[in-house]
Amino acid sequence: MIRHWIALILSLTAVAGSAQTLRQASPWASGVGLADRIPDRPADWPLLTAQFSHVTPENCMKPDALRRTEQTWNFGQADNFVAFANSKDLKVVGHCLVWAKDDRTPAWFYQDGAAPASKEVLLARMKSYIETVVGRYKGKVAAWDVVNEALDDGKPELRESGWTRAAGEDFIALAFEYAHAADPSAQLIYNDYNNELDGKREKMLALLARLKARKAPVHAVGLQGHYEIDRVPYEALEKTLIALRAIGMKVVVSELDIDVIPRGRWWADGNRHRAEMAKINPYVDGCPPEILARQAEQYARLFRLFRKYDDVIARVSFWNLHDGQSWLNDFPWKRVNHPLLFDRQAQPKPAFDAVVKELAAAKAR
């Protein structure tokens, strides 16, 4: 415990010695995804409040956490998270109202007794759910990821799920309409992954065009931004930012990190490499300086690109506060990872200095 507090003091001293914090340097809102139990972790609060203005709870506001069964609501942890954030002058991003994947939606949503729920039943449940959740936090949650990950990674435009099987595409526009009616002041976001890449970008733009034609209140697109070192898609990102600027759509980079242990091969060749990859854990004793330097250069280039389109970007949120809390320590296999701007002792890494320096230089131009 004493060592932990010493590390915290050193980290705060190091951050204080930096020219600026992310919150000060960014021309957009500076956000972070947080463990649901942040109200019980006072050691994290100084770093959090100095660096970030917006917070997204990792799990406690997802449908499976709030209403796993039709008979029960579980608001306790979400209430605590929102109250904590509001008390610290942090704006909350609710994540998420509708997750368009079968394994992320409570099974009862899709059932009507022993039969699959009809379109009318499913949409009525969605409406009731959104009205209850958004209404409960009206004025306390600044933004919502309304629909999450509805685009397919293959040939189909939309991911097949209980939502599309029952309601087709209608559930997407209606989710935004219901959320807007429940809180007209909240920013409403369509959030996805890899939607900056060629192919999926075009699906996203086509979906946005149809939603715009229906006058659905979509205020921003979330680009998740879970990247891998040496594989950050700068060119595809720029194409996407140009395209979204052209249609007047704001962007939030919603879940940013740069993995230093590339994971793409995990899913390659029918998953045949998983046993071999599960043994890969090269940075247990720390991330080598040359890897940290490469990561810093790539973060700097990424933020240089973001700054070029700062009229489009409304927020950049990192996914987790520091390396020790990153989801990439466990996904898709357990390893000691170093994907963020702050290390496992919450001290700023070369990537932090590179990002703040780039933002400061861009502001000075």
Image (cartoon, rainbow, N blue to C red):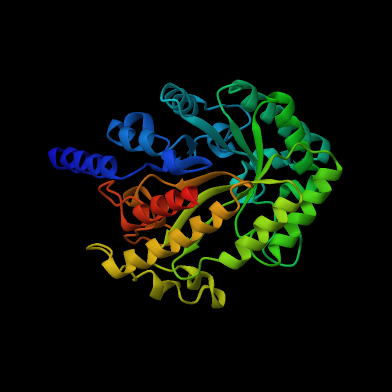
At x 43%, y 54%, the residue is: 358
Residue 329, percent from left and from top: 37, 56
Q: Nearer the viewer, residue 182 or 52?
A: 52
Examine the image and state in which quarter residue 10 appears.
top left
> Farthest right residue?
213
At x 27%, y 66%, the residue is: 289
Residue 324, percent from left and from top: 31, 50
339 over 77 or under it: above or below: below
At x 70%, y 25%, the residue is: 184
Instruction: Please indicate whether residue 233 sits to the left or right of residue 284 in the image.
Output: right
Quadrant housing the N terminus: top left
Number of marks in picture? 0
Q: Nearer the viewer, residue 22 or 211?
A: 22
At x 39%, y 75%, the residue is: 276
Q: Nearer the viewer, residue 314 or 358?
A: 358
Residue 31, percent from left and from top: 48, 41
Residue 16, percent from left and from top: 27, 39
199 over 191 or under it: above or below: below
Q: Nearer the viewer, residue 108 or 226?
A: 226
Instruction: Please indicate whether residue 206 sits to the left or right of residue 2 in the image.
Output: right
Q: Is residue 248 visible?
A: yes
Q: Is residue 116 visible?
A: no
> Farthest front residue?
365
